[in-house]
Amino acid sequence: MINAAVVGTGNISNEHIGGLLAFPDRCKIVALVDIYPEKAQAVKEKYGLHHAQVFDSHEKMLKSGLDIHLVHVCTPPSAHAGIAVHCMDAGKNVLVEKPMAPSLKECDAMLEAEKRNGVTMGCIAQNRFRNSIYKLKKMADSHLAGKIRCAHVNSLWWRGHSYYDLWWRGTWEKEGGGPTLNHAVHHIDMINWIQGGLPVEVTSMLANVMHDNSEVEDLSFAALRYRDGSVALVTSSVVHHGEEQGITLQCENGKLAAPWSAAAETSQENGFPVEGHNKELMEQLNAACDAIPDLQYEGHTGEIDNVLHALENKSRPLITGEDGRKTVELITAIYKAGFQKRTVALPITSDDDYYTLEGIQKNAVHFYEKTGCVENFTASDITVGNYVDDK
């Protein structure tokens, strides 16, 4: 039985708690932590976690002597590294919400703590455990449509003006960035996973077009070039009504997309497409996708199942700290390119100004200055992505 603790009981903690509760024979929640302990207490009562202890700091939890094997870090991004390192130094395995941390220096400190203590760290990128994304990866790896030549990655969300009223949101210091870091982190992990690595150069444009109570961007466009010459366009937004999210892969012989769709063309002598498409290849692509079995568990529950399996079998989770770091590295490159208004090269090394949070903050563009905030929102529903397969 794996004893789990959840540090940070805001909105996203519900996804973690729900995932843990899906496996009552394999794990149990023994601790809930929040700087506002009344929030943790409310979560305890909501889910009937009668045996869970409530703490107002992770330090008190660690000093309590409570037997804990896995700590879920669900706090604002600026606190991820400190909490994760403290927990790993105490011999605990950790599962860190996205983004892994706001800077590469913090990511490396987390990876060093994992290695130093012989523990396991996983990073949340739960959309790898969505059927649409999982099957897209399988289809891309099959090469039925040929090599990827161009990808369009749409991380399109909508958040009202009040979203950035929360005290830690909309600041470079506490949130670490806007939708490029905190929303497109999902999609950037997806394209890294599908492509099998990072691009070699990045160009970007950052803007804040709808949220004058936020220092950070609410919209960015990034163009990526890979070593094999393929390219990608990533849009990161919290201003898009409808929240249509997805990835389209234009391959040598056909198009693959999530939500699932496939298309293929053949050429006339003059280079224009033959009327009616390449129906034979499209039928092959659709049949191959249909033949891929659905995942047993999706989203956070799927990833938590994978992490529990890794701990039970002394193996590595699908999404490791190294994966989390790659995502942060690409996001950092997007910010660097946008701030400096030029194309930048990867990797970002430890002597780069943008390797540290202080360097990012020193160079960050403040679109607006945040002058007011609220300490907490009342409990309400949140959206965690729109990936409806309309096939």
Image: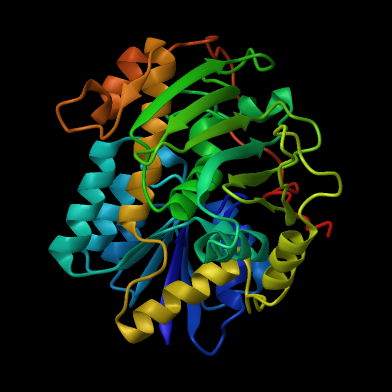
Near-viewer residue (67 or 15): 15
Percent across and percent down for residue 339 are 40, 14
Depicted 350 relative to depicted 83: above or below:
above
Percent across and percent down for residue 230 are 46, 38
Name the outermost residue toward the bottom.
25
Depicted 65 relative to depicted 40: above or below:
below
Near-viewer residue (106 or 375): 106
Percent across and percent down for residue 282 are 75, 60
Q: Residue at x 52, y 32 (%)?
A: 180
Depicted 192 relative to depicted 332: above or below:
below
Question: The C terminus lies in which quarter of the figure?
Answer: bottom right
Name the outermost residue toward the front.
269
Residue 374, visible in the rendered structure: no
Position of 260 with respect to 83 (left or right) is right
Position of 64 with respect to 154 (left or right) is left
Q: Which corner quadrant of the image does residue 370 belong to?
A: top right
Q: Residue at x 50, y 63 (%)?
A: 141
Q: Residue at x 73, y 54 (%)?
A: 262
What is the number of callouts on the image? 0
Q: Which corner quadrant of the image does residue 229 belong to?
A: top left
